[in-house]
Image (cartoon, rainbow, N blue to C red):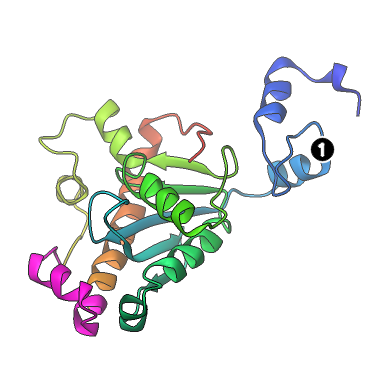
Amino acid sequence: MNYRTLNKAELLDRLDFRCIHRHNGLSHPECYEQARSKKERIGHLDIEASNLDASFGIVLCYCIKEDGGKTLERSITSKELKNGTMDKGVVKQCVEDMRKFDRLTFHYGDRFDIPFLRTRAVYHGLDFPLYKEIKGTDTCSILWKKFKLHSNRLEAACKFFGIESKAHPIKQDIWITALGGNKKSLDYILTHCREDVASLEALYHKISDHNNIINKSI
């Protein structure tokens, strides 16, 4: 390829691109051409955790809803809570599923879901996606920049936009009993997470056209 024929915008896009081999679009032009010719695969991500800080908390479950499609998910098991492996299996599967998408959306995920997952992955010695490997879009940031709601929480935004949400709200006693391995509580939390990604997908499509969806890395 004659790189002198590229305009500035394409040159910068190739330099900013990262393929699955962790090269840019200049050193791996075939990967770049293949990625740019296909439709971007979008997943809507949410996690539920036992604490707001990953140094003290663990991931109880995650869901990634394929845009317009199925949901990939995994919940921690009672056995994992009791045998000391804790959330390693959940985080490992989540990381593998994250890599199936070109872009992930989340709500307040820039400050919670992604840093929490990254911290737990590093703690367990897992290979978390590196800079520029997966793009991320935070619907909370779009609300903050482009709208003026009384609250930018997912539930409040869904109510404003007429989106059905949370038939299974957060209940303190359920989160506490889940940590003891109560299967009914763990199932409830996973259902709550499923509802969140369904709401997130609908919210993303309601508000994404009001903002430039940039190629920002998770």
Q: Quarter-wise, where is residue 80 in the image? A: bottom left
The residue drawn where x is 46% and y is 34% is: 213
Q: What secondary structure is marked by label 1?
A: helix
Residue 214 at x, y = what percent?
A: 49, 31
The residue wearing badge 1 is 29
Nearer-the-camera pick, 161 or 107: 107
Q: How many marks?
A: 1
Q: Is residue 164 magenta?
A: no
Query: Is 60 situated left or right of 153 in this image?
Result: right
Query: Is 164 situated left or right of 59 in this image?
Result: left
**Mark 1 crowd level (few <14, some 14–19, many ≥20, 10 Å Cα):** some
Residue 158 at x, y = what percent?
A: 20, 50
The reply to whether residue 205 is in sight is no
Quadrant housing the N terminus:
top right
Give the answer, above or below, for where 127 lies relative to 177: above
Nearer-the-camera pick, 207 or 43: 43
Residue 169 at x, y = what percent?
A: 14, 64
Query: Is 95 situated left or right of 26 in this image?
Result: left
Q: Quarter-wise, where is residue 160 in the image? A: top left
Give the answer, above or below, for where 119 lies relative to 8: below
